[in-house]
Amino acid sequence: MKNIQLSTDKHWIEAARARACLEQTTLNDQFRIRLKDYAQRGRKADQAMKLVDRMRGYVRLGERMPTRGQMNER
């Protein structure tokens, strides 16, 4: 694992440590979670767009929803 150094206002560090303590975790663990999420955002968006592309043949956008009466017709 690689170490990095960050700097911010003392107030934010203390508040974040207090919240992490309430959540029974550490500031370091929370930073790792946030960093991983931030790094994977682009990949998640690409996966979502691939899903949309696959669904294009199954879902028709722009068509009106049937009325209740039309849905109850037999």
Image: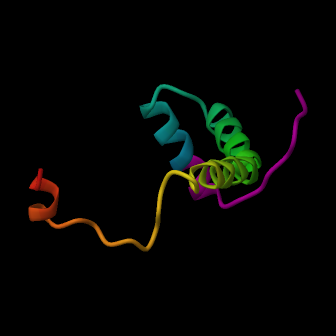
In-front residue for pair 32/59: 59
Q: In this view, does 67 lie to the left or right of 7?
A: left
Q: Is residue 71 left or right of residue 10?
A: left
Magenta portion: prevailing SS class: loop
Residue positioned most to the front: 74
Q: Position of residue 35 (x, y in %)?
A: 72, 44
Q: Quadrant of the N terminus?
A: top right
Residue placed at 72% from the left, 40% from the top? 36
Q: Position of residue 24 (x, y in %)?
A: 48, 25
Residue placed at 11% from the left, 56% from the top? 73
Colour approach in the figure: rainbow
Residue placed at 73% from the left, 45% from the top? 40
Number of marks drawn: 0
6 inside magenta stretch:
yes
What segment is highlighted magenta in the picture?
1-14
Q: Is residue 13 left or right of residue 20?
A: right
Residue positioned most to the right: 2
Q: Position of residue 48 (x, y in %)?
A: 63, 50
Occupied quadrant, residue 30: top right
Occupied quadrant, residue 29: top right
56 inside magenta stretch:
no
Residue placed at 58% from the left, 57% from the top? 56
